[in-house]
């Protein structure tokens, strides 16, 4: 990969690489390298070849960067560089994205403060109130099928995987959450905006107390209040798994400066907010079973992520009533 990155830098006039590219930790789907040349410093993302073989992968990746570039005058963010009119470049069947290096860091619990929550609430509100509309980017469908959890469970039994018990013990809850999501989708799909859709703390870099939003590959249409609930879960939960009232208020006060929240059906929103976690769970069960991805690393990461996601789904259900009361 080092030689390929050096060739990429030469071909696109990024300079001569002056030290060995360093893989940056944190990428669950793609690989990111820190690359220093005699012309600058870059973060170069090497896109997962298994993912890029999917029929819609390239279109989704291109559209995500169209979204980030459309919003870069509204909020602080890091968008991919453009080369020959493209933000995703291919060389020898490998796809890359190039970003200017930002010397910042992500913050996680327990370092997240009310200030961080206020900043994220303000940025999210600005995105949701921008009412961005781009040709070729379609709204999400008002329905989807239930995930085939039974087939995944049967395959897990057949392979006799180490995580079988944790998955089997939770399968009835998982199926009930999935049904709640599918039932809520028609109402939620009536109001959608274009947004980032993955405001996990790992996707925000902080430099001099200023946030920069990164990793836009999930960007697209979403019900704004469904995304708001997901962001509240990412940022305002303390180390004990409970909502922090101060952080909750800080985020909501900043968010509502830009967004009107009257007449929101919070019951439907909260039921629908399981969707992202369930999609991530289904994907990682498939990775752990060898049905997605092609390497042992994919399997290991799938196993780790599915156990953590099941745990997070249960924690979210346990604290949902508290969140519903505060939102109402």
Image (cartoon, rainbow, N blue to C red):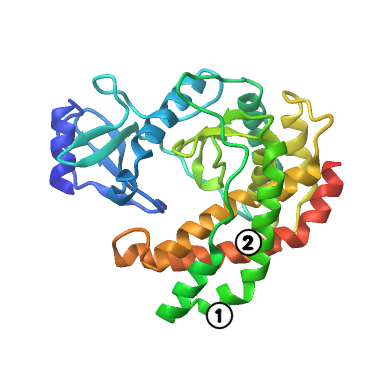
- Name the mark on residue 327: none
Q: Tell me what residue is drawn at x 44 percent, y 38 percent.
A: 217
Above or below: residue 186 compared with residue 50: above
* Crowd class of label 2 (few under 14; some 14 to 19; many from 20; radius 10 Å): some
Report the front residue among 239 and 303: 303
Report the front residue among 302 and 33: 302
Above or below: residue 103 compared with residue 136: below
Residue indicated by mark 1: 165
**The C terminus appears in which quarter of the rendering?**
top right
What is the x, y in percent for residue 140? Answer: 56, 35
* Crowd class of label 1 (few under 14; some 14 to 19; many from 20; radius 10 Å): few
Residue indicated by mark 2: 312
Disc tally is 2
Above or below: residue 27 compared with residue 65: below
Instruction: Mark 2 vs mark 1: give the one in front.
Output: 1
Q: Is residue 113 visible?
A: no
What is the x, y in percent for residue 184? Answer: 71, 45
* Disc 2 from disc 1: Cα separation: 17 Å
Q: Tell me what residue is drawn at x 67 percent, y 28 percent.
A: 125
In the picture provided, is 176 more to the left or to the right than 211? right
């Amino acid at each position: 990969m080092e030689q390929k990155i050096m060739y990429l830098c030469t071909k696109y006039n990024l300079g001569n690489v002056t030290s060995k590219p360093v893989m940056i930790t944190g990428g669950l789907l793609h690989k990111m390298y820190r690359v220093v040349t005699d012309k600058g410093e870059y973060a170069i993302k090497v896109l997962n070849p298994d993912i890029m073989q999917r029929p819609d992968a390239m279109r989704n990746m291109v559209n995500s960067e169209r979204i980030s570039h459309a919003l870069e005058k509204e909020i602080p963010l890091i968008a991919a560089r453009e080369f020959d009119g493209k933000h995703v470049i291919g060389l020898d069947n490998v796809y890359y994205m190039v970003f200017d290096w930002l010397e910042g860091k992500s913050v996680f619990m327990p370092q997240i403060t009310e200030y961080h929550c206020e900043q994220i609430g303000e940025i999210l509100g600005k995105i949701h109130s921008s009412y961005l509309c781009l040709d070729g980017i379609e709204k999400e469908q008002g329905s989807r099928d239930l995930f085939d959890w039974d087939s995944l469970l049967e395959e897990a039994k057949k392979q006799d995987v180490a995580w079988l018990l944790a998955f089997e013990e939770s399968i009835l809850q998982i199926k009930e959450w999935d049904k709640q999501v599918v039932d809520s989708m028609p109402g939620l799909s009536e109001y959608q905006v274009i947004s980032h859709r993955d405001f996990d703390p790992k996707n925000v870099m902080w430099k001099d107390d200023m946030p920069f939003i990164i990793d836009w590959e999930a960007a697209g249409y979403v019900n704004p209040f469904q995304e708001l609930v997901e962001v509240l879960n990412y940022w305002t939960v303390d180390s004990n798994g409970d909502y922090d009232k101060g952080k909750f208020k800080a985020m909501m006060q900043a968010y509502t400066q830009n967004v009107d929240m009257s007449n929101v059906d919070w019951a439907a929103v909260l039921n629908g907010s399981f969707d992202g976690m369930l999609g991530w769970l289904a994907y990682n069960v498939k990775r752990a079973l060898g049905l997605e991805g092609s390497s042992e690393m994919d399997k290991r990461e799938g196993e780790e992520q599915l156990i953590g996601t099941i745990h997070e789904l249960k924690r979210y259900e346990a604290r949902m009533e508290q969140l519903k009361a505060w939102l109402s």
